[in-house]
Amino acid sequence: MLLSFAAEGLYRPLWSTTVLEELQDAETQKLIRRGTSPDAADLRAVTLIANMRHACDDSEVPEASYQALEGTFGLPDADDEHVVAAAVVGGAGLIVTENLKDFPAASLPYGMAVSHPNEFLFDAVQIDALGAARAVGRVAARSGRFGPQMTFDDVLDALQRRYGADDCVRMLQIGPRP
């Protein structure tokens, strides 16, 4: 959903090479847990990362440009330093993560904040409800490639059930539809 919001121009994504590697591993494991064979899950995850790099070709912060900053923020988990370092180099003002505890405000550079994905989605819907609804519609339209075709409401149900995005879903249920 986050990527679909980006495709609608609701925000500009930014990530490090390491983030993409971690995402590929997490996506593979998620698909396997949902019943996809390991080979098919790996192929889909590799394809996702390739599509992200293609669709958002200016979003990846080169590793060499942020390596010198890694280890300078004093995060609770040193393995997360690359996230803040890439955000600084890329000019991001917000880090979107479920891992809020490892990005305390006191460790972030001035002007940088952290947000849970559900909060971020809700804020984006408040800013551009029609754009957000178009993003949901596109997710529904693409859904039949790897499973049953979903409707707009099916996507909202999945957002609520899988991710607990209750506020975002409520806003989209009462807002405009594409």
Image: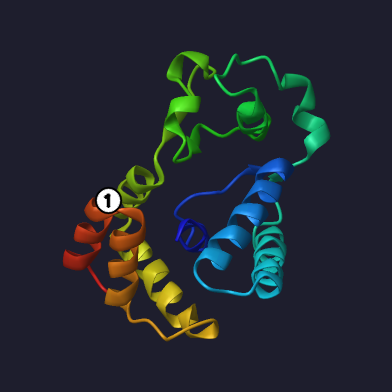
Q: Residues within 10 Å of mark 1 (few under 14, many from 20)?
A: some
> Considering the image in quadrants, where does the C terminus appear?
bottom left
- At 61% from the left and 16% from the top, the residue drawn is 73
Residue hosting label 1: 126
> Considering the image in quadrants, where does the N terminus appear?
bottom left
- At 22% from the left and 51% from the top, the residue drawn is 167
Q: Is mark 1 on a helix, strand or loop?
A: helix
Residue 124 image offset from top left, x and y in percent? 35, 50
* Residue 178 seen anywhere in this rendered image of the structure: no
Q: Which residue lies furthest to the right in this view?
A: 64
| Colour setting | rainbow
**In the visual, does 103 lie left or right of 125?**
right
Disc tally is 1
* Residue 168 seen anywhere in this rendered image of the structure: yes
**In the visual, does 157 lie left or right of 99?**
left
- At 28% from the left and 68% from the top, the residue drawn is 157
Quarter of the image where one finds residue 85: top right
Residue 155 image offset from top left, x and y in percent? 34, 71
**In the visual, does 145 lie left or right of 23?**
left
The amino acid type found where label 1 is placed reads: Gln
Viewer-proximal residue among 7 and 154: 154
Residue 3 image offset from top left, x and y in percent? 52, 59
Residue 45 image offset from top left, x and y in percent? 66, 64
- At 52% from the left and 64% from the top, the residue drawn is 33
Viewer-proximal residue among 17 and 5: 17
